[in-house]
Image: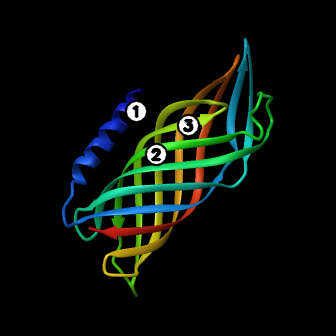
């Protein structure tokens, strides 16, 4: 809970910093997300069975509104959704295989833009917030963080397009399905196409 309160404060501070002015921008992104092996503990009654499950390649979509503090630094508030289908598991949990695991995240990010070279601008960023992890018709809200980096190029005076890698991680989520408790980690790697517009 303490982590979630801290994350909420970060998101609030980011929202305050991104008030509308000439240096603000909006962006959307989407692409493929690759879930790694997820460690999981399935508890039925007094019996806890540790194991893991694998996921197929899924998708990620999101958007953000930000503010360029100066030429190099920016802050932004972001919302994103990720989903992957579960294709195999080493533990038995009713409905787990062929279900999907998803996350709806609300993040505050800090971004560093490197100097532009030959029309291309590399950038890196990191953020923290909360994620609503869902599977087996249940969900849990936990602390989350991410790191990302990419390169963008101006295609008009106010619009940029780019390619970005993003790593996302969340605390263990506890999900209930009937009499079964599922404690699962959640993380993902994604490759996204990004479009942004300056206002």
Say what secondary structure mark 1 lies in. helix
Alpha-carbon span between mark 3 and mark 1 = 14 Å
Residue that appears at 33% across and 55% down: 76
Q: Report which residue position mark 2 lands on.
A: 145
Q: Residue furthest top?
A: 46
Task: Give above or below for 132 relative to 2.
Answer: below
Q: What residue sits right under mark 3 in the picture?
A: 133
Which residue is label 1 attached to?
4
Secondary structure beneath dot 3 equals: strand
Q: Mark 3 or 1 closer to N-term?
A: 1
Looking at the image, is mark 3 or mark 2 earlier in the sequence?
A: 3
Above/below status of 37 relative to 185:
below
Rendered image quadrant of residue 198: bottom left
**Mark 3–mark 2 CB contact (< 8 Å):** no
Q: In the image shown, does 177 or 46 lie closer to the viewer?
A: 177
The correct choice, above or below, for 37 with respect to 157 in the image is above
Q: Residues within 10 Å of mark 2 (few under 14, many from 20)?
A: many
Which label sits in the foreground, 3 or 1? Answer: 3
Q: Nearer the viewer, residue 107 or 112?
A: 107
Of the numbered discs in the image, which one, if any, rests on residue 57?
Answer: none
């Amino acid at each position: 809970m303490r982590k979630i309160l801290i994350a909420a404060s970060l998101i609030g501070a980011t929202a305050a910093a991104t008030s509308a002015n000439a240096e603000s921008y909006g962006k959307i992104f989407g692409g493929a997300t690759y879930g790694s092996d997820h460690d999981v503990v399935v508890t039925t009654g007094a019996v806890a069975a540790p194991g893991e499950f694998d996921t197929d390649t899924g998708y990620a979509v999101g958007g953000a509104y930000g503010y360029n503090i100066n030429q190099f630094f920016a802050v932004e508030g972001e919302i994103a959704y990720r989903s992957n289908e579960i294709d195999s598991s080493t533990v038995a949990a009713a409905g787990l295989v062929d279900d999907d695991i998803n996350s709806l995240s609300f993040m505050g990010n800090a971004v560093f833009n490197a100097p532009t070279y030959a029309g291309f601008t590399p950038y890196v960023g990191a953020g923290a917030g909360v994620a609503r992890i869902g599977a087996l018709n249940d969900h849990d809200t936990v602390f989350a963080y991410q790191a990302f980096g990419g390169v963008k190029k101006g295609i008009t005076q106010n619009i940029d397009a780019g390619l970005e890698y993003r790593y996302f991680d969340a605390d263990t989520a506890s999900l209930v399905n009937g009499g079964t408790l599922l404690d699962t980690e959640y993380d993902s790697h994604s490759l996204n196409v990004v479009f942004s517009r300056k206002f």
